[in-house]
Amino acid sequence: MRKLVVGTFLTVDGVMQAPGGPDEDSEGGFGHGGWSVNYWDEFMGQTIVGLTQQAGALLLGRKTYDIFVASWPKVGDDDPVAAKLNSMPKYVASRTLREMTWNNARLIEGDAAQAVAKLKEEPGGEIQVTGSGNLIQTLIKHDLVDQFVLWVFPVVLGSGKRLFGSGAIPASLKLVDTKTSSTGVATHTYERAGEINYGSFDVDEQHRSEELWQKPAESQAS
């Protein structure tokens, strides 16, 4: 089965809205667009190139598709990221988009969650999701995300669209990699790790657990 990877830029308080510019997404009166721009360094650029090269396909929502198609085809294939994005298969989830002008782009029709689930069963490489906040909420709600690559910027905004909304399914994650840029941006890679293992720090509960653990040893000693 193909792995579905969500990569997104986040503030420390979990906001993912409009990291790239003031006009990117002002929905809800959001006035902090462009909060990620001044934190980029060479390491982050190299990381983006490496992650993009791992992709077998790109999955996007309508708004992110519009942003990408307006810029990446113009960059040219001398740029390794542009060359990869322009050539590989791209799937766009939209109920309103009718014309696909980007090379090798295809429209996902019908229920997005069902379509993505079927897409994951097809042969091929890693499916990467970038931006696409509304689509990501659907993917999280239906437990379709296998890996998160979270770029956490040292910024707190206090408002805006967040990665994990009210529809998120409770789940355990496993940290498999973490890196930090010279500007303080931490890139954390998490994989799904099954259900949450709940416990308690209640003193009485801890004592009962210790007693149960010690009894077999005491019985053996006698």
Image: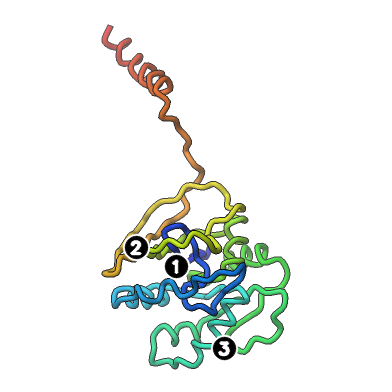
Residue, x 40% and y 63% (percent of image)? 155
Label 3, label 1: how far apart the Cα atoms are: 26 Å
Q: Depth check: 185 or 111 in front?
A: 185
Looking at the picture, how far across and down is residue 46, in whole percent? Answer: 32, 77
Report how many numbered discs are placed on residues in the image. Answer: 3
Q: Nearer the viewer, mark 2 or mark 3?
A: 2
- Kind of residue at disc 1: Phe
Q: Circle 1: is it few (<14), some (14-19), or many (20+) Cα within 10 Å?
A: many
Report, in whole angstroms, how far the alpha carbon at label 1 lies from the one at label 2: 10 Å
110 left or right of 43 in image: right
Q: Amino acid at mark 3?
A: Asn
In the displayed structure image, the side of residue 42 where residue 116 appears, left or right: right
Seen from the viewer's position, the closer of residues 181 and 161 is 161
Instruction: Determine which residue is flagged by label 2.
Output: 186
Q: Which residue is at a point 43% across and 63% down the rendered structure image?
A: 11
Element marked by disc 1 = strand
- Quick check: 217 left or right of 77? left
- Quadrant of the rendered structure where residue 25 is? bottom right
Asked if one can make out residue 123 in the rendered structure from this viewpoint, the answer is: no
Residue at point 34% right, 59% down?
177
Q: Quadrant location of residue 140?
A: bottom right
**Earlier sequence position, callout 1 versus callout 2:** 1
Give the residue at mark 1: 9
- Residue wearing tag 3: 103
